[in-house]
Image (spheres, helix red, strand yellow):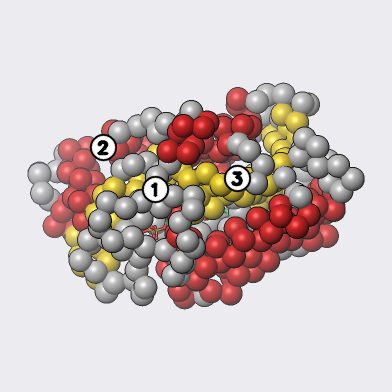
Amino acid sequence: MRKTILITGGAGFIGSHVVRLFVNKYTDYLILNLDALTYAGNLENLKDLAGSPNYLFAKGDITDLEFVSALFARYNFDGVIHLAAESHVDRSIADPMAFIKTNVFGTVNLLNAAKEAWKGSFEGKRFYHISTDEVYGALENDGTFFTESTKYQPHSPYSASKASSDHFVRAYHDTYGLPVVVSNCSNNYGSHHFPEKLIPLSINNIKHRKPIPVYGKGENIRDWLWVDDHARAIDIIFHNGKDGETYNIGGNNEWTNIDLINTLCKIMDRKLGRADGESAQLITFVTDRAGHDFRYAINSSKLQNELGWQPSLQFEEGLKKTVDWYLENEEWLEHIVNGQYRDYYAKQYENR
Ligand code: NAD
Ligand code: DAU
């Protein structure tokens, strides 16, 4: 194999798209997916890769230094693409400690394992940390954008934990010379998105004629990016990004939550053969999220100009494709709702 790559969090939403891209595109790389299979980890996301000769899965926690160091010793990784994280803002408000443990402590653990395993020579090595636009705080609706030099001003425990991990990654570059690269991306959408997040939750609720909870007045703005466009950006940055640099990734695609939900309702009315306006009646305004960031918007011109990346998909087309995927993969959603997805690991891996 030409390279051996550790991808953390590969059983999650974005991680599964990144693992699939790398396993299928780089058949001369060995890809090891390390994931603790928390509630958000779902190996059914990757069932199409079963049998791929260049794909391995390891169940383990990035906070466990002994386990992570043993993986480095055994596989002599050339690179790390680090996505494992607690990722849901509402959960971080309810239980911040889990976010500090995985996002901060777990990231520093991985950095230590990489630094130790690669000591002697960092030549040809790369530690790529995947982060979020939420570290920059919130914007007004005034046409400004987050750039790579925007000051960090995180508001939620989730974004504070991601900001902290970003600082540690850069500190390991500046202090020890570890070859790192960081990217900060806007909201992703697409297939295999866990149904606690706005778009998959709404699709599921519309399908079952359940209320669609819209926080506050639904005026908050997010910049939505097709998940495979993020995976493509990760591929480009991993291979061509410069050591020590940060790249912002975004869709240039801002929507208020209420406009997004109304569009989704229209798409689903058509797909489900309902009368126009029927699904929109499910919209229910609920108490706002505490500390709810008003607007995120990314300027990704550095990535576009220096590394030639572009978002590929127009949003309404992407939303239609996303709805189609959820309607065609009812079993995937049912297994999450009834908890069966958590048995998949035991069935596939435990007796090997
Ligand atoms: P996700 O919650 O869907 O998946 C996270 C994965 O990490 C899960 O498979 C989970 O089992 C695993 N994990 C959690 N704790 C772990 C631990 N201690 N050890 C090993 N594995 C662990 O998350 P996602 O939405 O796919 O996000 C992936 C990464 O991308 C995160 O770092 C997130 O901050 C970042 N990000 C997400 C978005 C987005 O819109 N979803 C946008 C920008 C950046
Ligand atoms: O910006 C990148 C971030 O996007 C990632 O770093 C996070 O991991 C990811 O979860 C996402 O965070 P958000 O908080 O923006 O995503 P979420 O889907 O939770 O919410 C999107 C918007 O919709 C937000 O303004 C809150 C609102 N919302 C959310 C839910 C779950 C609702 O109005 N109702 C809901 O039920």
Q: How many angstroms separate mark 3 from mark 1 (CA)? A: 17 Å
Can residue 61 be seen from the camera position used here?
no
Of circles 2 and 3, which is in front?
3
Q: Nearer the viewer's eye, disc 3 or disc 1?
A: 3
Mark 2 or 1: the one toward you: 1
Residue 121 percent location from the top left of the image? 86, 42
Mark 2 crowdedness (10 Å alpha carbons): few <14, some 14-19, many ≥20: few
Residue 50, given in percent of the width and then of the height, sits at 64, 34
Q: Mark 1 points at which residue?
A: 298
**277 relative to 101 in the view: left or right:** left
Residue 245 circle label:
3
Q: Using a 10 Å C-alpha cutoff, classify the residue at mark 3 as few (fewer than 14 neighbours), some (14 to 19) or many (20 or more).
A: some
Is 283 on the left-hand or right-hand side of 126?
left
Label at residue 316: 2
Q: Which residue is drawn at 25% across and 57% down?
A: 141
Q: Nearer the viewer, residue 85 or 299?
A: 299
Which amino acid lies under the numbered mark 1 shown in the image of this protein?
A: Ile
Answer whether residue 30 is visible to the viewer in this image. yes
For the point 34% across and 68% down, the residue is: 292
Q: In this view, does 292 lie above or below 55?
A: below
Name the element at disc 1: loop
Left or right: 174 as drawn, with respect to 163: right
Secondary structure of residue under mark 2: helix
Which disc, if any, is residue 349? none
Q: Which of 161 and 258 is in front in this view?
A: 161
Q: Which residue is drawn at 60% across and 45% down?
A: 245
Whether residues under marks 3 and 1 lie with C-beta atoms below 8 angstroms apart, the answer is no
